[in-house]
Amino acid sequence: MFPTEAPPIILIGHSMGGAVAVHVAQKRAIPSFAGLVVIDVVEGTALESLYSMTSFLRSRPQGFRSLADGIAWCVRSGQIRNVESACISFPGQLKRVATGESATMELDKGTALIDVSELNLSGNLPENSSRQFFTALANTSPTLTSATSMISEEGEEEDDEAMAASDAHVVESGNGELTLPSNLSGTALSDEVAESLESNQVPPPPHTNSQLPPMPISGSTDAPKSSSSAEAAEHLLTPGGHGAYTWRIDLSKTEPFWRGWFSNMSSLFLSVPEPKLLLVAGVDRLDKELTIAQMQGKFQLKILPRAGHAIHEDSPDEVASCLAQFLLRNQFTGAKPKQ
């Protein structure tokens, strides 16, 4: 890949990916390894949470009627609190029942679309989800040209004012402007869906839930938040359901390996001599060993309390800022002069 000298490499991993990054760093497998960033995975709380994983996997819907249906479940259940992120990343967990082809491959080839009008989010939403995102889709996407005719000029002005007054957790890109992921398409929001979203009462997000398999990180051993039985039945597939989606990977088959990835992980993390950054969604995520080490200044800690387990998806701008500060602090790069 690098014909001459390899550049400094920083490993970044989330959840079980963070455990993999720790093991790779500790084995000194990369000659030009320079730093380690781990996102929301800690040995103590990870091992405690494994006890609830089997019940969580059983409680998930077995499949979804459409990609939009799956994304709606993902957001309502709190797996990802940022609707835009869910539209991009959640399809990667699904495959079409009839063909076995991954949903991301279908989106890349144009054989599948995410129909915005099917994103039925009338239930309770996490705080980071808002109607402004869907209004922005209708107003900015060239593939949703019919959307503008369904929203009056007065309504557009009200939505613009609402977006300007909303807090920093409204879905937005790094430059503050809402953008449309390239794999989104479909028809305009129906009046019924728009009214449902507009009237929805958004509760504050839970502090420690929103874990994703196969390793939820929480200070308690309670099962991660899952859909109600009625909601699960709404999405449940019959075997061989035509045109529907199911999970790409049977995570229950990986259960024998879960504990091995997390055992002794805190010690391995601390044994890495290079600069280290740990991003967590709550201070309660830390186990005793890491708490002591952090007080001794052995690694850099950043807490993003308004995000769920998928910190980098719920608060991508904040995570990007943390990474930039980490790079500058350790002189991996220099600050760009202001124009």
Image (cartoon, grey):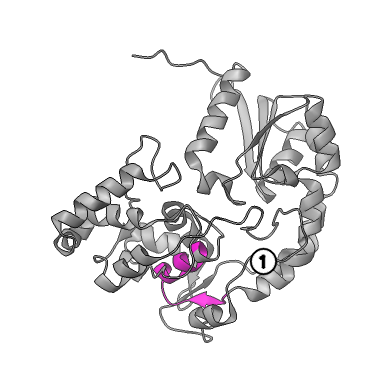
Q: Is residue 141 visible?
A: no
Q: Which residue is pictured at 60% across the width and 16% down the height?
A: 331
Q: Secondary structure at mark 1?
A: helix
Q: Is residue 187 left or right of residue 67?
A: left
Q: Is residue 129 visible?
A: yes
Q: Is residue 89 left or right of residue 216?
A: left
Q: Which residue is pictured at 30% across the width and 68% down the height?
A: 195
Main secondary-structure element of the magenta-colored stretch: helix
Q: Does the magenta run of residues contain 275?
A: no
Vertical placement of residue 16 versus 4, above or below: below
Q: Is residue 245 left or right of residue 35?
A: left
- The residue nearer to you, when weighing 156 against 279, is 156
Quadrant of the image for the N terminus? top right
Vertical placement of residue 223 versus 156, above or below: below
Quadrant of the image for the C terminus? top left
Rate crowding at label 1 as few (under 14), some (14 to 19) or many (20 or more) other CA atoms within 10 Å.
few
Q: Position of residue 286 (x, y in %)?
A: 77, 42
Q: Is residue 333 left or right of residue 105?
A: right
Vertical placement of residue 323 versus 15, above or below: above
Q: Position of residue 54 (x, y in %)?
A: 73, 70
Extreme-bottom residue of the structure: 238
Vertical placement of residue 321 versus 19, above or below: above
Q: Position of residue 211 (x, y in %)?
A: 64, 58
Which segment did they paint magenta?
61-75
Q: Which residue is mark 1?
A: 251
Q: Position of residue 67 (x, y in %)?
A: 42, 68
Q: Which residue is pictured at 72% across the width and 66% down the height?
A: 53
